[in-house]
Amino acid sequence: MNGRPRVLVTRALPEAGMNKLFLHCDVTVFSAERQPTAEELKALLPQYDALLCTLMDKIDRELLQTARPKVVSTYAVGYDNIDIAAATEFGIPVTNTPGVLTNATAEIAWALLMAVTRRIVEADHFVRQGKWSGWSPLMLLGTELAGKTLGIIGCGRIGLAVAKRAKAFEMNTLYLNRRRLEEATENEYGLTYADLDTLLGQADFVSLHVPYTPEAHHLINRDALRKMKRSAFLINTARGAVVDEAALVEALQMGEIAGAGLDVFEAEPQVHAGLLPLQNVVLAPHLGSATWETRTKMAEIAVENTIKVLQGEHPISLVNPEVWTTR
């Protein structure tokens, strides 16, 4: 490689995680304020050797075919925004940052669960608006966790981290996974395997941790919501399109479920207008990995992946390993 490789970074990332990239490459950071549009990305990327993008950037076949970057390094675990088949066809390695956001995402799931069940956001507004006149036996009553049943759909790293915390709350935990876990793991985390209908029918809280795939699209739809208890809560920190948002709005409005905590949405950053006025839903702007520790580590891994590929070395985490076997 002649000279320093040129890397386009679509959004400003934590500086501590970016330092190594600045040392090894000529780096252009598009913006700290917004994503590049599809047209801007298409115009810029052919001038660069590598792309370090976020989950908000759509990396489609046309862009990959036109620009032919040596690597697409995504600052995320999920990569449903990238046309992996096209990248593989064009011999472009795609890398991601798995494993480092497990605790942060599990914690945000619990934060949402506890906020909606104990009505924390409502209570905050209640105090700030000067409505609190003193203690009352029936004021803002919520739902306890101890002795209740948590249903986890998708029991990978994050699902298991959520289950581990459920034990501290003395909860019963059902789970559904593409592959049933080993008995030793089930025993360690206090898990009971269940099919989808059983889990939805028995769980007091349903927490989603599945990767987005065509099969997972609207996994929680109108029929699924109607199978849940009227006293149940839905928590989604996976991907927005796993839930049919319109059906969820209807279920919340009709009292078919008790509430929801959402960190992800179908058309981010747009949120279904029907969710906004509802008191029984807590909304967060995709904060799953939003801790200094996690976001810095994600940047370090994304940078390391980028540099390794540019230097001809195998990256830390390769989404499409078949491109490497053909080298």
Image (cartoon, rainbow, N blue to C red):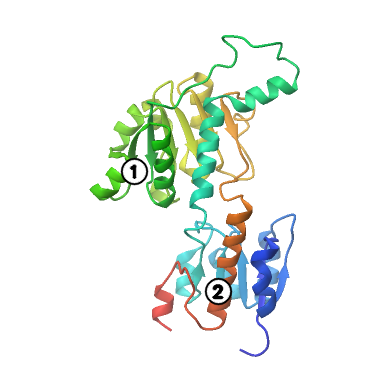
Mark 1 and mark 2: Cα distance apart in space: 38 Å
Q: Is residue 22 above or below residue 13?
A: below
Label 1 close to label 2 by CB (< 8 Å): no
Name the residue rendered at 56%, 69% in the picture. Answer: 72
Name the residue rendered at 69%, 57% in the picture. Answer: 35
View extreme (top): residue: 137
Q: Quadrant of the C terminus?
A: bottom left
The residue labelled by disc 1 is 189
Near mark 1 (Cα within 10 A), the count class, few <14, some 14-19 or many ≥20, is some
Near-viewer residue (21 or 168): 168
Q: Is residue 149 above or below residue 3?
A: above
> Mark 2: which amino acid?
Val
Name the residue rendered at 51%, 83% in the picture. Answer: 312
Q: Secondary structure at mark 1?
A: helix
Of the two numbered discs 1 and 2 on the same chain, state the one appearing first in sequence.
2
| Residue 285 position by quadrant | top right
Q: Secondary structure at mark 2?
A: strand
Left or right of residue 170: residue 183: left
Name the residue rendered at 47%, 68% in the picture. Answer: 317
> Mark 1: which amino acid?
Tyr
